[in-house]
Amino acid sequence: MTKSPSSLAAFFLLLAVSGCASSSGLPAAAISETGIAAAYLPLHGRVHLGLDSAEGAAVVIAPGIAVTNAHNVNLINPKNVIGTRQDYDLMFFRTGRTAAPPTVAPVIGQSVTAYGQGADRELRVAHGTVREITRCPGCTAPAYFTFAGNAGPGFSGGPVVDASGSLVGITFGYKDMRSERLIYAYDIARVMTELEALGQSARAR
C-alpha cells in the first residue's frame, strides 16, 4: 500500500510496488463479518526480480468479479485481469468466487474496520473512524473517504467495512500525520461506477 499525497493526480505519480517487509494493523484470527469473509481475497506475489515478497488484498464485488488496487498488478494473474481505470487506482479481475457482500455508503463519524495482509501472509485488521468524504468535480458518486486508523502496507485493495458488516470502500493509500495515520479508501459507489464504466468502454471497442 502506498502513501497518499494531497491530490489523487500526484498520488499516481508516486505509486510504488505493493507490499513491505513490515506489517500494519493487528493480527486477526478470522474475518468476523460473514459476507466479507466469503468475499475477501488475500494476495501474494514476488517483486524486485523475485527477491522480495509483496502482500495485498482484494474483495469480490459482483459474481465472478473482484477489485483491488491497480498497483497490485504484480499480484494478479494477467489472464484474469478485466481492466483498470485510468483516473483511479482500481483494477478489476475475474475470480471463481461468486458471493459479493452487501454494500452501503460511508458516513462521517462512523466506525469502520479494514482488512489486509501482513508480511507473513497473516490476516491483519485495523479499526478507525471516518473523517471526511470527498467528491470529484462533476461526479455522481463520491471519489474517496478518509479514516484515522493503523492500516498500511498489505492493506492495498482490501475491504473497509462498517459495523453492520457492509462493504463501504476499498483501501488505496495512507498519509502519516503528526499524531495519527490517515487512511484513504475509495467509496464503494465510486468502485461500482468505475466497474460499470469499464464495461461500457469494453462494449464500445
Image (cartoon, rainbow, N blue to C red):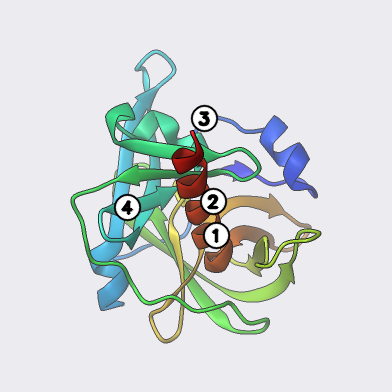
Mark 3 / mark 1, whichever is N-terminal: 3
Q: Residue at x 38, y 80 (%)?
A: 165
Q: Which residue is mark 2?
A: 197
- Disc 1 secondary structure class: helix
- Residue 113 is situated, as x and y percent measured from the top left of the image, at 47, 72
Q: Amino acid at mark 4?
A: Ile
Q: Which residue is mark 1?
A: 193
Residues under labels 1 and 2: Cα distance? 6 Å
Q: Which mark is residue 160?
A: none
How many neighbours does mark 3 have within 10 angstroms: few (below 14), some (14-19), or many (20 or more)? some
Q: Which residue is mark 4?
A: 65
- Residue 154 is situated, as x and y percent measured from the top left of the image, at 44, 46
- Disc 2 secondary structure class: helix
Q: Amino acid at mark 3?
A: Val
Mark 1 / mark 4, whichever is N-terminal: 4
- Residue 47 is situated, as x and y percent measured from the top left of the image, at 41, 23
- Which of the two discs, 3 and 1, sits closer to the camera? 1
Q: Does residue 94 lie above or below 187 as drawn?
A: above
Is residue 68 in view from this perspective? yes
Residue 189 sits in quarter: bottom right
Labels 2 and 4 touching (C-beta < 8 A): no
Residue 38 sits in quarter: bottom left
Q: Does residue 69 lie above or below 107 as drawn?
A: above
Labels 3 and 1 touching (C-beta < 8 A): no
Q: Which residue is mark 3?
A: 17
Mark 3 / mark 4, whichever is N-terminal: 3
